[in-house]
Amino acid sequence: MLIKAIVLVLFTIISVLLLEKSKRRWIQTILNWFPAILFAYVIPAIVTHSFNLDLSKVELHSWSKDYIIPFAILMVMSALSFKQLRIIGIRPIILFAIGSLAIAVLAPVILLVINLFTPEFQTLLIDNENWKGLVPIVGSWIGGSTSQLVLKELVGCPEGLFLTILVLDNILVNIWTILMFQLIKKSDWLNNFFGITDKVPDFVKDENEFKSFSIKSIVLTLIFSFLIIIVFSLLVDSFLWKIVIFSILGLVIGNFVPKWNHALVLKLGGLSIICIMAILGLKLNFNNLSIPLNLVLFVVIWLISHFVIMMLVAKKMKLHMAWVPIASMANLGGISTAPAVTAAYNKEWMPHAILLAILSMVSGTFWGMVTMYLFGLF
């Protein structure tokens, strides 16, 4: 199964790269609606579904978590300069934080509003204690699987309910990822519609001069990068600490190591993200659809409300609309999908998506406890 998974991932990566380079008009039309990098997510899912393959537990997933994701983080973050951080400013972080706050408080607020019109949701969520399944959703959306499992134990979510929530969460996040890929492509149109003139300059000026770099610069960058990955992957076990350490190391290296090839690491970071998306696609399952309709409706309203609030905040701050799907995916998708969605608009923004995703990882459990407290008031 491992060999099949590796072959499928390699086939997916090559297919995506060929799609990106294709000049055919009909392919470009498709890519305008369905970005090439998103094919990295759905091609493995289509193949596994069509041939009834279960590749969700192959060792490739642990390799991705232990080595490929840290490598992508190091590459992307070492393309980021402190000057970029100053140019971007605090507004995207404010938008992201408000998005997290909205996720945490909206579920009980929406229940209060709906309860004014129908008692069905009161019965479904409070009387039947299904609200205990919504708290791990907050952890999953903001903090990832670790926060989700911690909050499951904290709130005492029953196993049967937790399984239902896992299926619902998986389906909705997959759909949301596709929607955010599409939305970020429309960012410039949204800016014009809302009269937003916020612009971000080209950060990596030498990106188009990649071929002019010396062999010495390329070799130095590659050797240094692989040594760092091997050494710190062996020394550090915690995934969260790996992400934090490689992010900091990337920032330091990218800003202080002479001859660091910023254009190269940006390209390698983008390639790594495609690989990560392809491996994630091995887990995408189209069969798990048995979920109570009312619960689905409630969570969909919750998710859309979170997005609407972020749109309103971005409009109020006159912030580039691309930050809305980026911040939303940093909350819901995390360290893998946030930079992937960002790359569909501008690869040079990927480091900022990673920074927001890290904030999401470290704050998920806290926001889940806020939700738990608010539901406890019922």
Image: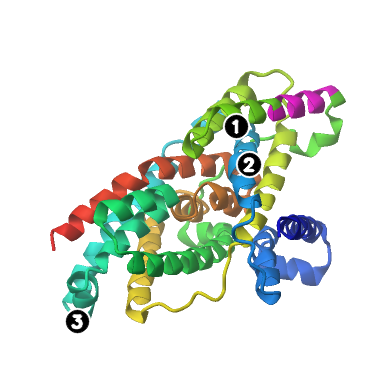
Q: Quadrant of residue 15?
A: bottom right
Mark carried by residue 233? 1
Q: Is residue 26 left or right of residue 68?
A: right
Amino acid under disc 3: Thr
Please report the bounds of the magenta region as a residue range. Answer: 216-226
| Residue under label 3 | 118
Q: x, y (%) of residue 289?
A: 48, 77
Separation of residues labelled 2 and 1 (CA atoms): 26 Å
Expressed as whole percent of the image width and height from the top left, the position of residue 143 reads 41, 48
Instruction: For label 2, count other residues whose C-alpha is less than 10 Å away and answer few (under 14), some (14-19) or many (20+).
Output: many
Kind of residue at badge 1: Ser
Q: Which residue is pictured at 81% across the width and 69% down the height?
A: 25
Q: Bin the neighbour count of mark 3 within 10 Å (Cα to Cα): few under 14, some 14-19, many 20 and up.
A: few
Rendered location of residue 26, percent (x, y): 79, 72
322 in the magenta segment:
no
Residue 188 or 9: which is nearer the viewer?
9
- Identify the element where label 1 is drawn: helix
Q: Nearer the viewer, mark 3 or mark 1?
A: 1
| Labelled pair 3, 2 in contact (Cβ < 8 Å) | no
Q: Amino acid at mark 2?
A: Glu
130 to 97, vertically: above or below: below
Whether residue 260 is visible, yes or no, is yes
The residue identified by callout 2 is 348
Secondary structure mostly seen in magenta is helix
Disc 3 vs disc 2: which is toward the camera?
3
Q: Is residue 155 above or below residue 66?
A: below
Measure how far apart labels 3 and 2 are at the Cα level.
Answer: 48 Å
Pointer 2 with pointer 1, Cβ within 8 A: no
